[in-house]
Amino acid sequence: MTERHQTALYDAHVRLGGRLVEFAGFMMPVQYDSMLAEHHRVRKAVGLFDVSHMGEVRVHGPDALAAVNRLITNDLNRIADGRALYTCLCDTDGSIVDDLIIYRVSPTEIFICVNASNRHKDVAHMRAHLSGDATLDDESYGWSQIAVQGPNAPELLGRVLGAEAKKLKPFRMINMDFEGATVRFSTTGYTGAKGGEIYVPNGKAETLWEALLAAGADLGVGPAGLGARDTLRLEMGYCLYGNDIDDTTNPLEAGLGWVTRLDKAEFVGREALVAAEKAGLKRRLIGLKVDDRGIPRSGYPVMAGGVQVGVVTSGTQSPSLGHGIALAYVDVAVAGLSGLPETPIADLAVDCRGRLKPATIVSLPFYAES
């Protein structure tokens, strides 16, 4: 039987009428009023997400920075203390163990956010490959995490956490005080909107959640669930582990070469990725726009000239754009992949339950704030 945990905000979700489902071992709100309303709330005002199911790992010690840098594809030496970066965690064969947000607190302390469903295997993998004078602690059950996202998020964060939270630049992290507790505030997120994420001790999570709702009443604040989180991230072309990336994919074919520093010192999986690049990629993760009625879904075939050339990994009807969008792995031999986006390909289509819906390769993100 799957173990089901409750986050520190469980009672708050029940009071707000959230529809709770099991996700990654936690009872999480998939929606409150409607996914569509919550999506638009984030794009137009400000939404609050409980993302306390995510995992938090801290690596500390004299060799912490170097030890973590040998685990990841990106390069912690490229950023200063107090900054964050997005990266992949790879196995020795170059496959993706997880994608992470890593915060460089100092050379002796690195804070890592891991995907909820991958926490146990991530921790085991990191411990197996950790080297030097560094200690890894899984602190996941000590933290709650609240994402505050939307154009009005900076104003709301300033009201609750102080002026420094309002003006902090993207991909930064600072420690702040909230009612006597130290919280970690970062200007990161999974929606493409302004705002950030607050790592707060469990005992203060509900108080902080209620304070954000109260302080943002005139800003259009409201809760948002996992359903809206998924449509928001897909509009930005952000990968979802288990759909668009997993242990059968590598960062290069997933379009994550920009966080894969093959020219840095050794890291787990580097040799395999260098070999893959040299051999040439056989498929690429791309964005597809579907204009015809019909929603592309994960697993739907991508067709060209009557032949399957790929498969959809994530798809939806974009609430912001009003048409179907999808991420899909497509054979690199398909015309246009090596050229410019927006390239029409003869008969390129998504097979939506036996009906071919014309599709066009487009650049990512699908949605850009005006």
Image: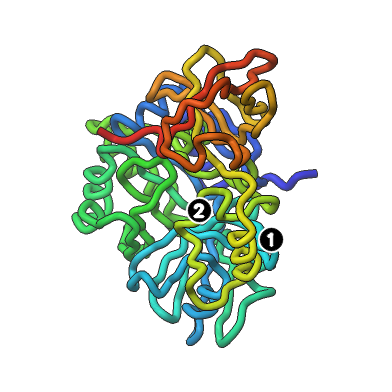
In the image, taking residue 110 as reference, residue 165 lies left or right, namely left
Q: Residue at x 55, y 29 (%)?
A: 315
Q: Residue at x 64, y 22 (%)?
A: 305
Residue that carries the numbered disc 2 in the rendered image: 256
Q: Residues within 10 Å of mark 2 (few under 14, many from 20)?
A: some
232 vs 52: above or below: above
Residue that carries the numbered disc 1 in the rendered image: 121
Q: Are marks 2 and 1 in contact (CB under 8 Å)?
A: no
In the image, taking residue 198 as reference, residue 256 lies left or right, namely right
User: Would you identify the image quadrant in which residue 187 lies?
Assistant: bottom left
Of labels 2 and 1, the one closer to you:
2
Q: Give how far across and how far down residue 39 sits, in percent.
A: 41, 29
Q: Residues within 10 Å of mark 1 (few under 14, many from 20)?
A: few
Q: Amino acid at mark 1?
A: Lys
Give the CA separation, mark 2 to mark 1.
21 Å
265 vs 3: above or below: below
Q: Give how far across and how far down residue 303 sits, in percent.
A: 64, 25
Q: Residue at x 39, y 53 (%)?
A: 198
User: Would you identify the image quadrant in which residue 312 lies?
Assistant: top right
User: Would you identify the image quadrant in which residue 78 lies?
Assistant: bottom left
Looking at the rendered structure, the secondary structure element under dot 2 is: loop
Of residues 124 and 327, which is closer to you in this image?
A: 327
Tell how many labels: 2
Residue 312: mark in rendering: none
353 vs 331: above or below: above
Of residues 13 and 74, which is closer to you in this image?
A: 74
Q: Amino acid at mark 2?
A: Leu
Residue 32 visible? The answer is no
- Mark 2 or mark 1: whose residue is earlier in sequence: 1
Classify the position of the C terminus by image quarter. Answer: top left
Q: Residue at x 64, y 44 (%)?
A: 242
